[in-house]
Amino acid sequence: MRRMDNRGDFIQRLGLDISINILNLLDDPSDLVRACAVSRSWSQFVIENSLCKQLCLKLFPELSSVTHVIEVENLIEPVKISAGGSPEWERLKRDNRVYAFFARGLTPLIKKDCIIEPISASSTDNYPDESIQNTLEPEDRIGFRASYWSSKGESDPNVPEILTYKLVAQLCVVTEIQVQPFQAYFQFGFPIYSSKAVRFRLGYSRYPLELVDGMLIHHRWSDNDFIWMYTSPEFPVAQENELQKFKLPEAVLCIGGILQVELLGRVQKQEMDGLYYICVSHVQVVGRPLSSPFDIDTLDSSGKFTLKYNPETQLPEGEADTPSRLRTFTTRLLQLLGNGPVGNNELDEEPPVL
């Protein structure tokens, strides 16, 4: 391929601001990788000006206030200083790769079923018939049996209840949480056992969640077992038998994949015992999970974590096109990093450095 001279290099001719504005018009991480392949000066320009990070924020504007967490204290991976390099340059190169993978890794489609497993309920009236497991069912009846979770009865209507869930991915952009109070159609007057308000918290567990035969082991979890990175405002709950949608003020990146639903206050007293209950028939989370090749290791209570990428991870059905898409993207990026073969027809004579 004929090398580009300075007369055809708009980056050198147009200057910093205009060149950044032009490259910011790109809407695919692969395009920036190709831009890096043009020449060393283009590669250096993309990296020094954090264009992959800017593209990531443009693709997912909901991450604008939280994407710093994948960069905290540069704990994504150890920085290795190459010959003639500097720690700052190596950090910029590494961050360029990480943001490119991150932008490529978020599933483009909104999922309405981001809960994979219930963890615990602060109380349960009749276990297992009224357990938190029932809240994963979209209907309030299964056959002839009612499907719902019920708290224990309380004489004080201000006693709250807590439901805790595990999400489908350790990194998940959550935009909305939906809760449906349960209407006891088998009781006189068909009472609805809603809470007065609801609040949500997102975070991660201090301890590994134990699995046996693919099933989560349920312990007596307490609030001290979790670290919460986000707490929503309180939302009023209507005493109605419908799926109520609570849209978060801003989309939130849940780090660690744990959701807590705080049910605040009780409104319905059961006639037979004079106690207040809260009953929920369904909970679901709307958001974008990070695709399966990505995972995190939480390091400490400050929220620092290591972002891990494994392109060989087997993806579930529904992400069928993602393995080849990510693998092609990864191979191309590794080629530009000097870790894989590059065809002569793809790069100029002066290979760029990422």
Image: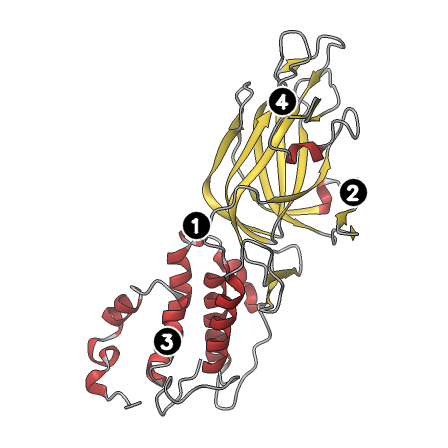
Marks 2 & 3, CB-CB < 8 Å contact:
no
Q: Nearer the viewer, mark 1 or mark 4?
A: 4
Numbered label attached to residue 218: 2
Q: Which residue is mark 3?
A: 34
Q: Which residue is mark 1?
A: 62
Q: Which residue is mark 4?
A: 182
Marks 2 & 4, CB-CB < 8 Å contact:
no
Q: Secondary structure at mark 4?
A: loop
Task: Relative to 27, say whether 235 is above or below.
Answer: above
Q: Is residue 285 left or right of residue 38?
A: right
Q: Residue at x 72, y 44 (%)?
A: 224
Q: Amino acid at mark 3?
A: Arg
Give the distance between the C-alpha atoms of the residues marked 1 and 4, in whole angstroms: 32 Å
**Residue 226 versus residue 3: which sits nearer the camera?**
3
Task: Relative to 325, say whether 1 is above or below.
Answer: below
Q: Residue at x 56, y 20 (%)?
A: 241
Q: Secondary structure at mark 3?
A: helix
Give the distance between the C-alpha atoms of the residues marked 1 and 3, in whole angstroms: 26 Å
Give the distance between the C-alpha atoms of the residues marked 1 and 2, in whole angstroms: 33 Å
Q: Quadrant of residue 114?
A: top right
